[in-house]
Amino acid sequence: MKILTRIGALALVVLTLASAGSSRQKPRNLILFIGDGMGVSHVYAAITASGNTMTFPSFPVTGFSRTHSANNYSTDSAAGGTALATGEKTNNLMVAMRPDSTILVTLLEHAKAAGMATGIVCTSSLTDATPADFATHAPLRYEYRSIAKQYINGAADIFIGGGRRYFVPTPDSTGKINHEEDVVSGLSRAGYDVTYDLESFIASKSDRIAGLMADGDIPMISDGRDTQFLARATAKAIEVLSRNRAGFILMVEGSRIDDAGHGNNTSMVIDEVIDMDRAVAVAYDFAKRDGKTLIVVTADHETGGMSITGGNLAKREVKAEFSFTGHSGVMVPVFAFGPGAVEFTGIQENTDLFHDFFRLLSLDRKRR
Ligand SMILES: [Zn+2]
């Protein structure tokens, strides 16, 4: 009897370990969402305005990320994105480079070396700091032409955002064209299907697609951006990247949350956070079916020192105030779903997120 009880207890332990194991499994794919400038108040304003119907706030694992850069308590997007993309803190304004300007290998570059597929989807210019941090390197984030040119190297198989003006040559005052600036021809030679509108991007049959959707940033929701743009671009990227049996990494940025924060505009903050959540919902549907995809939603920093001073849940109203128009030093939230999600609980350095991704995707062992 005693022995039987012991066997029963042992079976229970084995079963418990097996079920705990499922949340500790390793993912094959990673979809990382970065809400640029998205702090806890930005998320809660959107939760309230949506009537608590958002996807990522319902993820089972939540945590916080400490965002300070190597030289500043308050990071900018360049150093904040570099921390997430490379696992090292650098100085503000630097793109995937150490403070001494040596190059830091990015998550997407590690993934390419491991035979994985890679992608970037954003609503800013592709040359903006956050997307640039994952695919390019620059000592100064404003080196837009150099950043655009580095997309030819192919760290991202598929990328879509704005910033077309840095990919096409501009004629000088005499009308002469500087072909050095012609990044589009370089992309075509490198095998990219270069597209200029969402329908062509979605219709492309290629597995290497460039989407140059606007001259500069893609408009904010309040300026008429299609509320399906980010979700549809994300769906297409997942469709293409998931063909790769070795797995994929996709970074999706809700870029314009930051602009709404800088502008201290509550309704614009809400629109942009809810817009990113529509793209998260697409990824979540895929991840639930796939079972091998980790989704992490976080931010590079908080913008505006936003605080919620009142509201009404039934009326879905939020009253918010902002402390200033810059980036604050406060921790930002982390939400995770899928195999390995449990690693993202508690308070971590932003650089730790990279090291978790690296280990969970076995990028050290996959390199060839
Ligand atoms: Zn900003």
Image (tube, rainbow, N blue to C red):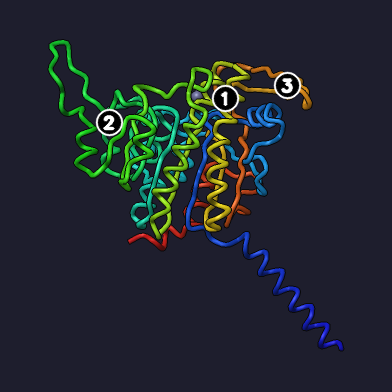
Question: Which residue is the extreme one toward the right?
Answer: 1
Amino acid type, residue under disc 3 in the picture: Glu
Q: Quadrant of residue 128?
A: top left
Residue named by callout 2: 146
User: Mark 1 CB in 8 Å range of ligand 1?
Assistant: yes
**Residue 141 visible to the viewer:** no
Q: CA distance from mark 3 to mark 1?
A: 21 Å
Near mark 2 (Cα within 10 A), the count class, few <14, some 14-19 or many ≥20, is: some
Image quarter of the N terminus: bottom right
Disc 3 vs disc 1: which is toward the camera? 3
Pointer 1 residue: 303
Amino acid type assigned to the residue bearing label 2 in the image: Ser
Label count reads: 3
Q: Earlier in the sequence, mark 1 or mark 2?
A: 2
In this view, the residue farthest toward the top is 173
**Sequence-wise first label, 3 or 2:** 2
Is the residue 21 above or below the residue 166 in the image? below
**Residue drawn where x is 15% and y is 21% of the image:** 177
Q: CA distance from mark 1 to mark 2?
A: 27 Å
Camera-near label (3 vs 2) is: 3
> Could you say where residue 315 lies in the image, as x and y percent from the top left?
76, 23
What residue sits 38% from the left and 34% below the top? 199
Q: Residue at x 58, y 36 (%)?
A: 277
Near-viewer residue (189 or 289): 289
- SS class of the residue under badge 2? helix
The answer to whether the residues at label 3 and label 1 have Cβ atoms under 8 Å apart is: no
In this view of the protein, which residue sits in the foreground, 276 or 355? 276
- Residue at mark 3 to residue at mark 2: CA–CA distance: 44 Å
Task: Name the side, left or right, on which 112 lies relative to 184.
Answer: right
Rendered image: mark on residue 317? 3
In the picture, measured across the screen, residue 83 lies left or right of residue 95, that is right
x and y percentages locating residue 7 in the rendered image: 77, 83
